[in-house]
Amino acid sequence: MRAIVTGGAGFIGSHVVDALLTRGDDVLVLDDLSRGTRENVPEGAQLEVVDIREPLDFREAEVCFHLAAQVDVRVSIERPEHDAQVNVLGTVNVLEAARRHGTQVVFASTGGAIYGECEGPAPEDAPREPLSPYGVSKLAGEEYVAAYNRLYDTGHVSLRYGNVYGPRQDPHGEAGVVAIFLGRLAGGERPRIFGDGRQTRDYVYAGDVARATLAAVGKRGVFNVGTGIETSVLELYELCRKVAGSELEADHAEARLGELQRSVLDVTRAERELGWRPEVGLEDGLRRTWESLQP
């Protein structure tokens, strides 16, 4: 299969590229390198430095995995116009390029930032109440994907990722807390926990996310990609200390504006229709991530 991965030099995108190459696919990475790096693009994939808001040529690719995005919630609050330009207009540009070439789009969306506060594992039809411009822009991207399916009878799909973590994670992204915790512990520094630390997230390993993303090829609709398991920030930090063998205590700071208290995804649909389920437990995934940071 010939595949394009926008944002393929970034954290999650590079794991998708790895999975495609392992399968023997032909991969073109489109990335402006604003957050990603050339080092993240493995040998065997072609890299073109391009902004997704610029004219795109999909060159008869069968599928485009669209992971290029503005992913920092704080940036979306400080610069909502920039967030919308990248996440909404950029996605429309990708959809137009896909329409011209008959390419399926697998759109990387977000679960936590779209659903807002969760009372329990949120299914795909749960109310969508984003608290940040980032969540709004991702939801708008989903709606464009659905509208193109209705208007042009395309077969695009949206994946609502949980808090993805793993090797090569950007500490400044939406789910960057794992990278921050482990990075600071590796440097012998005390990490900072915002709020009381009881806020929960659904942490899902990047390798599992890459498998789900490939499983979505040929599908249509919206799927959650998470674990269905809640972990508090306090619990996460204790596991990070365990895999790092550290005794450092964390500092505490005031809660941040727009931060959710509870976020967890129901992944029943993905299990049923994609034949996918997470395989890497949190402690195992954290240990793999910690090992990737060692010289």
Image (cartoon, helix red, strand yellow):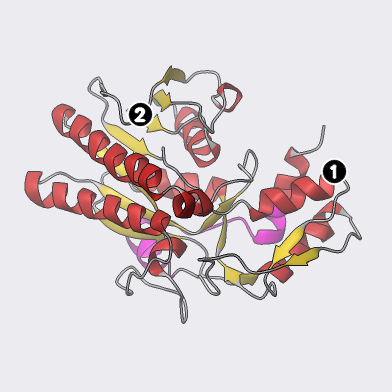
| Residue 256: % across, % down | 60, 65
Most foreground residue, 163 or 153:
163
Most foreground residue, 112 or 17:
112
Residue 27 lies, with reference to residue 280, above or below; the image says above
| Residue 46: % across, % down | 44, 17
SS category of the residue bearing label 2: strand
Residue 266 lies, with reference to residue 54, above or below; the image says below
Q: Which residue is mark 2?
A: 4
Q: Nearer the viewer, mark 2 or mark 1?
A: 1
Q: Which residues are magenta?
A: 266-286
- Residue 283 in the magenta stretch? The answer is yes
**Residue 242 placement: quadrant:** bottom right
Please indicate, yes or no, whether residue 217 appears anywhere in the rendered image. Answer: no
The 10 Å Cα crowd at callout 1, few under 14, some 14 to 19, many 20 or more, is few
Left or right placement of residue 247 versus residue 47 in this view: right
Q: Residue flagged by tag 2: what amino acid is it?
A: Ile
- Residue 91 in the magenta stretch? The answer is no
Say the numbered circle drawn on residue 187.
1
SS category of the residue bearing label 1: loop
Left or right placement of residue 140 versus residue 172 in this view: left
Q: Earlier in the sequence, mark 2 or mark 1?
A: 2
Q: Residue flagged by tag 1: what amino acid is it?
A: Gly
